[in-house]
Image: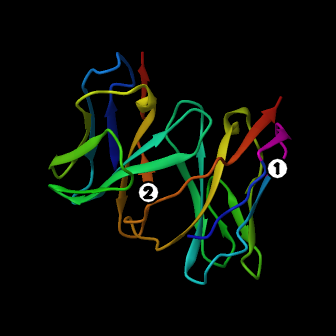
Amino acid sequence: DAKTTQPTSMDCAEGRAANLPCNHSTISGNEYVYWYRQIHSQGPQYIIHGLKNNETNEMASLIITEDRKSSTLILPHATLRDTAVYYCIVRVALGGNEKLTFGTGTRLTIIP
Amino acid sequence: SQTIHQWPATLVQPVGSPLSLECTVEGTSNPNLYWYRQAAGRGLQLLFYSVGIGQISSEVPQNLSASRPQDRQFILSSKKLLLSDSGFYLCALGQSNQPQHFGDGTRLSIL
């Protein structure tokens, strides 16, 4: 699996857009980019995924560069409840048999 | 909708005692099931996964074992707990064309 690099921590003001970067320079053509987040003492929560096109859902937007070597997760209007550790993962297959490897992620703190 | 139940939410056990953590899922059939462990301040480590009843694959050598007696039940066990078994244990569910989903975990402290 391709390795990912994320900043250890970030702060964002409440109501502003939170932009979380992820580098995955060794990503293969058939690997997807997944984003999960983990709020303290809870299990990871799936946010969004993509292959090469930008994606948007009710939680966030995912912007993948044209060369696919990096991506950005965007939370458009951050709230205090978005404070969590955010994990960027690259993995082959969209199917449920993937064995996910989580790094240490980015600790995002939303500031009131 | 799919639901993952894990219990207990927290557990304190002495060194050398046995362990049994249960995970049950609803709203799905024939899922892939996973056990992960997260040590304090660390990422998740996959311990076991199962693609069906009685089918268990172990990812790392360890003091733990897993069993899948029913399609929607996944159990994590140990005969004698070690201090190093402390951590946050997460059960996850995966199915074709769906991202993996996680339960709320069990926080295990070994004294």
**Left or right: B46 as drawn, with respect to A13:** left
Task: Please state the chain letter of the residue tagged with numbered disc 2 in the rendered image.
Answer: B
Q: Looking at the picture, which amino acid does disc 1 mark?
A: Ala
The 10 Å Cα crowd at callout 1, few under 14, some 14 to 19, many 20 or more, is some
The 10 Å Cα crowd at callout 2, few under 14, some 14 to 19, many 20 or more, is many
From the top left corner, tell me how far across and down residue B83 is, in percent: 43, 25
What is the quadrant of the C terminus of chain B in the image? top left
Say above or below: B68 vs A41: below
Q: Which mark is residue B18?
A: none
Q: Residue visible at 46% across and 74% down?
A: A93
Task: Please state the chain letter of the residue tagged with numbered disc 1 in the rendered image.
Answer: A
Total labels drawn = 2
Q: Which mark is residue B100?
A: 2
Q: Is residue B1 visible?
A: no
Front one among A71 and A8: A8
Say above or below: B47 vs B5: below
**Whether label 1 touches label 2, CB < 8 Å:** no
Q: Residue visible at 52% across and 45% down?
A: A44
**Element type at marker 2?**
strand
Q: By what rule are the colours in the image chosen?
A: rainbow
Q: Looking at the picture, which amino acid does disc 2 mark?
A: Gln
**Element type at marker 1?**
loop
Front one among B21 and B5: B21
Q: Residue visible at 41% across and 40% down?
A: B90
Q: Residue visible at 39% across and 52% down?
A: B60
Say above or below: B26 vs B78: below
Front one among A96 and A82: A96
Q: Over which residues does the magenta segment extend?
A: A8-18
**Left or right: B45 as drawn, with respect to B24:** right
- The CA distance from mark 1 to mark 2 is 26 Å
Please determine if labels 1 and 2 lie on a single subunit: no
Q: Which mark is residue A17?
A: 1
